[in-house]
Amino acid sequence: MENFADVKYILDGFLFLFAGILVMWMAAGFAMLEAGLTRTKNNATVLTKNMLLFAISCVMFYFVGYNFMYGDGSAFIGSGAMLSGKTDEAMGYPVMADFFFQVVFVATAASVISGTIAERMKLWPFLIFVVVLSGVIYPIQGHWTWGGSELGGVIAGFSDFAGSTIVHSVGGWAALAGVLILGARKGKYGKNGQVRPIPGSNLPLATLGTFILWMGWFGFNGGSQLALGSKTDINGIAMVIADTNMAACAGAIMAALLTQLLYKKVDLTMVLNGALAGLVSVTAGPDLGMIVSGIEGLVGGALVVFAVPLWDKLRIDDPVGALSVHLVAGIWGTLAVGIFNPEVAIFAQLKGIVVIGAFVFISSFIVWKILDMVVGLRVDEETEIEGLDIHETGLEAYPEFKRA
């Protein structure tokens, strides 16, 4: 029995580490996707943001956020010594393996924001917001859910397997709060309501980023099984990964079919976001079977096709479609668990979405507003026209390209 316990300890710890490495690779996917869907004059800034947001999230979550999320504390917020004073023996797996798996999720939420505010926000205000998000905002709502407090029973019964709401919609709500204050890119919207497309610079790069994210999602959802030490666990992980893949496929196909029907052409950017929307949609319930996952992915892919132009009608400028993918599809995926899982009440899912969404949006809006008042969120008009790279980083991503 002692040997069995050792084997389970090793396998469970390995799952956290290996899955965490896959999720960390998603940081590269977000960077490539955002760089591909924005203009070359801003690409060095995009890459700088994605590097630093990951680094900041890891440091802040280690020193502050992990305790707020998993410490005993109160129903609202956790507390305790560094990493809550947990020991490997008490947890049944290496505590640092658990920390590593959790911290890469925090960076994912921050990555969602980066794409939404791209091409017109100053670098440092964004990074300061990441400090607050990863150290305070994300861990508090995480304490209510994965931390086990259920906010004193307020959101009892809420279910989110790997984070459609807890990770993806959190990033979406924070991004929405920021972009409402920031405003649209110069020239995106005309005076009479017309929407002017601003094409991305590199669709092959955006496609590469999507495939990297797709692969990383197998760690995101598969690792959320949280155990590898039994036949039941490996069967569960296999089901979760297969379901995750099916949802992405369904989302991409639905986006392709809808854009062909609506616009008489298949829109690659919609197909990419359709796959990602399928992934976000299945994340709350990737253990519900292949058919359910396919339905979740199909609906997620359809929602993106309709949500992207809807945000534009509202004059909310989202260069990479992150609000449609992570916020809209995240809400749908969380509700889908209540629809397809008889053990979960849809009212509990709706209540969790509203409570978490309200907290994240309001707290984020306050932080963004303070930053805007103190240091300003937006670059000046000259910087936006010339590109953020020279002014914010002193570098260009493609210095050999000559501007007309």
Image: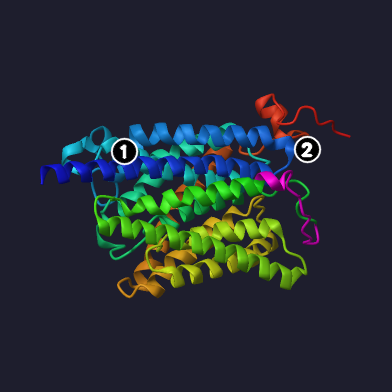
Residue at position x 64%, y 33% in the image = 45
For the C terminus, the image quarter is top right
Q: How many numbered marks appear?
A: 2
In the picture provided, is 147 more to the left or to the right than 333? left
Residue at horizontal 62 percent and vertical 54 percent from the top: 321
Q: Residue at x 35, y 50 (%)?
A: 142
The colour scheme is rainbow
Nearer to the camera, 107 or 183: 107
Q: Which mark is residue 385?
A: 2
**Magenta region includes residue 113:** no
Of 121 and 274, the residue lying toward us: 274
Q: Which residue is mark 1?
A: 97
Classify residue 342 as left or right of residue 28: left
* Amino acid residing under circle 1: Ala
Q: Is residue 117 visible?
A: no
As rendered, which of 209 and 193 lies closer to the eye?
209
Q: Main secondary structure of the magenta part?
A: loop
The residue tagged with tag 2: helix, strand or loop?
A: helix
One can see residue 128 in this view: yes
- Residue 195 located within the stretch drawn in magenta: yes
Name the image quarter holding residue 150.
bottom left
Kind of residue sitting beneath label 2: Ile
The residue stretch that appears in magenta: 191-205
Q: Position of residue 342 (x, y in %)?
A: 33, 75
From the top left corner, tell me how far across and down residue 309 is, in percent.
Answer: 68, 63
Q: Nearer the viewer, mark 1 or mark 2?
A: 1
Task: Give the residue displayed 21% in from the left and 35% down from the top.
Answer: 85
Density class for disc 1 (Cα within 10 Å; few <14, some 14-19, many ≥20) is: some
